[in-house]
Every structure is written in structure tokens, then in C-alpha cells.
Image (tube, rainbow, N blue to C red):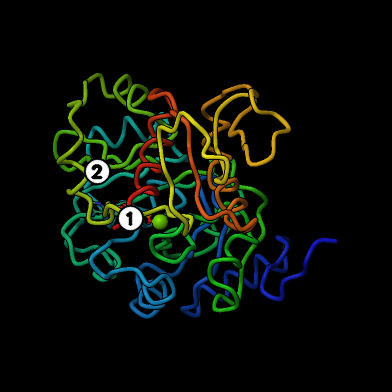
Amino acid sequence: MKKSYSNIYTFNKKTLGKTINYLKNGNVAGLPTETVYGLGGNAYRKSPIEKIFNLKGRPKSNPLIIHYYNLQDAINDIEVNEYLLKLYKQFCPGPITFILKKKNQSKINPLASAKLKTVAIRFPKHKIIRSILKKIDFPLAMPSANKSENLSPVCAEDVFDELKEKVKLIIDGGKSKIGLESTVVDLTDTPEILRPGVININLIEKVLKLEFKKNTKNKIIKSPGMMKKHYSPGIPVLINQKKHDKKSAFIYLGSRYQNKKKFFSLSKKSNLKEAASNLYTIMRKIKKKGYKKIQISKIPYKGSGIAINDRIKKASQTL
Ligand code: AMP
Ligand code: MG
């Protein structure tokens, strides 16, 4: 039988109304998006932003992504440029975040963007979050609904797992389709990828008709949130593993170890998009089963595999 949670709500007309009022009153809620579940609050007000940082235990130096229904709604907050228009047309709504210059007149609370002159914006695609954004007259500051450094939640129960009853309202929108955080592209100057995602570098290059510099080392630091340790299941993670140590949980691609205990496939067909969508669910499951360590085999460095490698590399950091 499915466990029942006092703060997880099925989405319907009544709970939509409740969510809207809740957000209008300055509260924060656990909300579904196609990437991962978010902890959303009014981006124009200070108190919900403070609640978000406190609930997550997130350093105030790490800015939040601001979520809008469409570009028209964002126009007073950000400086629009050609790159944004091209990427917006191709990929939005969808799992891509843009860093842009903030307009002086912007109403975004400075705390949400860590007092920077730039701001990260996204137009999520999940129909529940879109129906909420359409009905409110402010954007949502919304980082992933997990404790800082932990794995992002990809279903309502994961949000509960992370934040328990500290969030009074969590909307159940099923499993997040993408399952990894959005691609982050800095468009304040020559475009740069700050965080890889399922909308991958090649796709973005094609639309912008330019090539990104391949050395990404320095870029990581440009984004305040890209601290080393992140996306951690709470137990040690070892990557590029060839041999099972007989004790740990072993994550791999394909069906080679099907039905073997301690082996967990990200995708039986070795499909990297599917693998990305299963990564966090599998790591969370492994942790819950009581394993003490996770080994992960080599994941191809192409397509969604680039984003998977980025996340598991950070999950494997001990500091
Ligand atoms: P999260 O909210 O956890 O999905 O992470 C959002 C990511 O976007 C973090 O790594 C932030 O550091 C990054 N980000 C947000 N705003 C900015 C900004 N103005 N400049 C650079 N990176 C940003
Ligand atoms: Mg996060």
C-alpha cells in the first residue's frame, strides 16, 4: 500500500487554488517540474526567499533560478538579447536556464540572485507548474527541493524524504521526466555552458551557430552554485569503476548483470536520456537499502552522458 503523507497533495482545481493562495501569502511549496522538483516562492518578496535558503541550508552566495510562464512575463526583469531569443524559440518552455543581465527596474528580490547584477531564469514545461505560473502575477524563485548538497528530488515522496514536514504543501506531479537539473547557459557575454544538461552542448551550438570553448574548467567557478560537492546520495560514490568490489551497489548501463543482486542498470537499452532520468531514483533507492558505497561504471561522454558525468563526478567528491 502506498504510504500516505500529510503534506503531499494530488493536483486538481482545489489544490491549484490552495497552492496559488499559499504562494501569494509568501509561503513556499514543493512543486513538480520536468527536470526535478523545486521549492518555490515569490521571487519579488524577501521572506519566501529567506525561507527557501533556510529550508535548504543553502549558502546565501548561491543564487536561485527564477521561473516564469513566458518571456513576456520576464521582460521587466532581464535584458533580452539575440542569443536568448534564439534559444527561447527553440527550447522553451523546457529544461534550460539562462543567465542574463538584470534590469535596474527589476523587482526580483536581491537575495534571490545573491546580490549579483545577473539573474538566472527558466521557463519550465511541466503542465502543473505552468498552470500555477499562469495564474500568479509574480515569478517563482525555485531551486531543487532538497537539502543543500543532496540529490535532487524527482518525485513528491523524494521531497518529503528531504524536507519532511517542514514544507507544508507538496504537489504530486508524478516522476520528473528529465530527472536531472536544467542546462545552465550564461548569455551575458559570449555564451558559455555553466552546467551541462539534457539539452546538450551540440544542440545549443547548432541553434546559436557557434562553438563553445571546450575547456570547461574555469567556467564552473563562474557559477556560484557550482561548488565541488553536490548531488550527493550521502554515501561515498566511486566513478569509472571496472570491477565490482562484491559489497557495494554497482550502477551500470545495459543489461549485462540483469537480475544480479547489488547491480543496478540506469537503462537496459543503454539509452543515455533514460539513464539520466533514472540516476537520482536509483541512487536514492540504493542509499535506502542500506548500502555503504556506490560504484559507477564508465558512462559515455556524449549527449546526456555529459550531464550524467558532471553529476556523478560531483557526487563522488568528498569535500
Ligand atoms: P539549482 O537552483 O540548485 O538548480 O542551481 C542553480 C544554478 O544556477 C546554481 O549552480 C547557481 O549558482 C546558478 N546560477 C543562478 N544564478 C546565477 C547567476 N546569476 N550567475 C551564475 N550562475 C547562476
Ligand atoms: Mg539544486
Task: Residue type at mark 1: give it.
Answer: Thr
Comparing 315 with 50, the one in front is 315
Residue 164 lies left or right of residue 313; in this view the side is: right
Quadrant for the N terminus in the image? bottom right
Q: Is residue 107 above or below residue 181?
A: below
Of the residues under marks 2 and 1, which one precedes in the sequence?
2
Residue behind mark 1: 318
The residue drawn where x is 49% and y is 59% is 38
Q: Is residue 85 above or below residue 314?
A: above
Comparing 62 with 215, the one in front is 215
Comparing 172 with 151, the one in front is 151
Residue 73 lies left or right of residue 59; in this view the side is: right
Asked which quadrant contains residue 86, the reply is top left
Residue behind mark 2: 80
* Picture coordinates of residue 177, whole percent (x, y): 59, 41
* Picture coordinates of residue 100, whole percent (x, y): 23, 48
Q: Residues within 10 Å of mark 2 (few under 14, many from 20)?
A: some
The residue drawn where x is 38% and y is 60% is 149
* Picture coordinates of residue 212, whole percent (x, y): 21, 26
Q: Residues within 10 Å of mark 1 (few under 14, many from 20)?
A: few
Queried on whether the Cβ of the residue with tag 2 lies below 8 angstroms from ligand 1, the answer reads: no
Calculate the distance from the C-alpha at mark 2 to the C-alpha at mark 1.
Answer: 39 Å
Q: Secondary structure at mark 2?
A: loop
Task: Residue type at mark 2: give it.
Answer: Val
> Disc count in the image?
2
Comparing 274 with 317, the one in front is 317
Mark number displayed over residue 129: none
